[in-house]
Image (cartoon, rainbow, N blue to C red):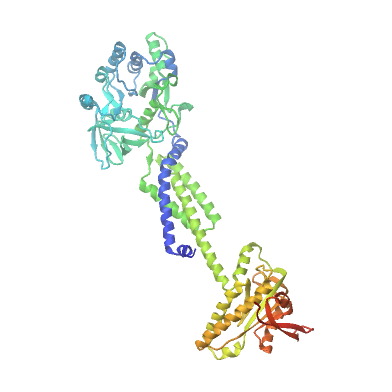
Amino acid sequence: MANLKNFIKSKTFFIYSALMHIFLSIIVIFVSWFAFEPKVYNFMVQNFSARSQGDKNIAVIVIDDKSIERYRWPWKRELYAKIFEYLHEYSNPKIIGYDAILSSSEDKKSDNILFNKLKSIDNLVVGFSPLAEINENSTDYLKMFGDKFKINVNDKRTDIYPNIYNSISKFPQEYFYSIKYAGSVNINQDYDGYLRRADNIVKIKDSYYPSLALKMYMYLNNSDKVTINNSNIIVDNTNLVIPSESTPVGIQNFTRYYKRFKNSEYTHKKYSAIDIIDSLDNIKAGKKPIVEPAEFNNMVIFVGANAKGAGLALEDALPTPILQRHPGVDIQATYFDNLMNNQFIKTTSLIQDLFTIVVLSLIAFILITKLSIFQSIISLILIGIVYFAFTAICFSYGIAPNVITPLIIQLITMIFGYSYKFILEGRNKEKIKNAMGKYLSQDIMKNVVQNIDDIKLGGKRANVTVLFADIRGFTSMSEKMTAEEVSVILNEYFSEIEPIITKYNGVINKFIGDAVMAIFGEPIQDINHPQNAVKCACAMLNKVEQLREKWLFEGKPKIEIGIGINTGDAFVGNIGSEKRLEYTVIGDTVNLASRIESYNKVYKTNLLISSSTYSHVSDITDVIKIADVTIRGKSKKMDIYEVLRLSD
């Protein structure tokens, strides 16, 4: 226990506490980044970032449940041809993005209808999928694919991850030669399944390929080259700078999502594919189309599929911060919307996040040291509210700082700070208690501490035994000695008798010069207080005899003490004023004990007790009765007893 107290007192304890706080904070930071921040990020995006409407010049045409009610899945590709015919022959869209991956041929005749239709469309970008699997048989195809669809890249990165892609989903030969542009439609979810980032550029072997959205943007801006840095992508011939980061699956950026279009599951205006097909048929039949072709003039159109009723094979929906089942074709439209309007979410850097954590922790530490616990808690709550409001504003402007982690670390700092402060305060209280115990009895101190909320003037009557001990001839002796010599003798004397009084359940009430007043029976409850007081007196006399021999050897003066003991009722409690209290015992019992002690000088004795005390100790002492003694302040004479020894 002593070692623990010394450890707490040392600077080492502070250092260990600080290191423990740092270690725990590091663990909490990593746990929070993976467990809490992603969920909070979703909340902040949904409520503060995704507040604006998607671009009105972007729309999606979807093979939905309504479409497959008319034509059962899988669709023949001639139906797709009708959609593209409608857009190309009767409308004038800026560009069309085809969010689908065609792999194998199905119906030769139907396929050729689609492929022949696509040959005539110059503003169409189709989707492909990079693959991690190694396919040695596709080496020639990969080269042919790269020659046609890869882009020129000036890669200035220093933090490049190993490339995980080795091949590409293979197009039917006729489809490959029919299309002019292609972009990756790969979507990589975070570890918790949510889609927060877009893959703008993927690397397959030694070639770079744009995403579907980026290729569409480059086509519209007549750009064929990009520059990649550690923190962004710069599209040549444009003012577009995409805040990006390198990952094993590609060069990604955080997507800025938009609010749902008229509370639908889409964030851009959505058209049913069957309405487009019917509109084409109506136009050819001379009837009014369901959807006017002019609606798509100068629009950016994405074509894809998302039909829940068709089962998982056709449902293309993933969880995003704003929707649990966000249609994939609308996600692709969102990616392009970000590029076209230069709207992204930019995350704060690691250094910025750590700086925020450190600043908030320091603020918490300062508040803990300067304010009361209530004031600091209120202040920290207000700081938390202000910080949350600050992060909400940041998200509304497309900046995503850590939200919950700094607040958790601030809370941990508060807990550690108050724990450390509590330990220090406990140590200081113990030091104060020990220091006061040198002026007051430890037992009185304990009584005060136990009743700390009920300290007041007053007390009670109790049966106690009072012991007075006085050094004989101390006044004349002290006149022959220096003050330092007197203090040495007194300090040694008091140091030796204090443990004896404590041993017998006594409490030193006060030192009066060279005299000691001790109480037995209060505040320590002891039914044998008269016997213990007498035993204590005998032990004190023995100790003084030992000290006398020691002092004589040291050349110090010979001393003797006289002890007087009386038992009776007295007032025990706090006396004084409301501002200055003293725990003591007063009454005739105390006065009589003092006067009995003074008779030691008269009868040349060392230990005298009253008859009331003798009645309790007669069976344990050998005494000499001194009869008919006149006591000052008493009208009647009384008997006192000299205690010679404790009987066997």
User: Residue 595 is drawn in which quadrant?
Assistant: bottom right
Residue 222 percent location from the top left of the image: 26, 29
Give the quadrant of the C terminus: bottom right
Residue 510 percent location from the top left of the image: 62, 76
Please name the residue shown 33% across and 29% down the image: 186
**Can residue 346 be seen in this snapshot?**
yes
Give the camera-side residue of 389 and 488.
488
- Up/down of 603 relative to 591, above or below: below
Q: Please identify the residue farthest to the right as the structure is shown.
A: 636
Q: Please identify the residue farthest to the top as the structure is shown.
A: 285
Give the camera-side residue of 454 and 329.
454
Residue 503 placement, left or right of 315: right
Residue 310 percent location from the top left of the image: 42, 19
**Can residue 367 be seen in this snapshot?**
no
Residue 566 placement, left or right of 208: right
- Up/down of 625 relative to 230, above or below: below
Residue 319 percent location from the top left of the image: 42, 31
Residue 7 placement, left or right of 148: right
- Up/down of 238 relative to 621, above or below: above
Q: How many marks?
A: 0
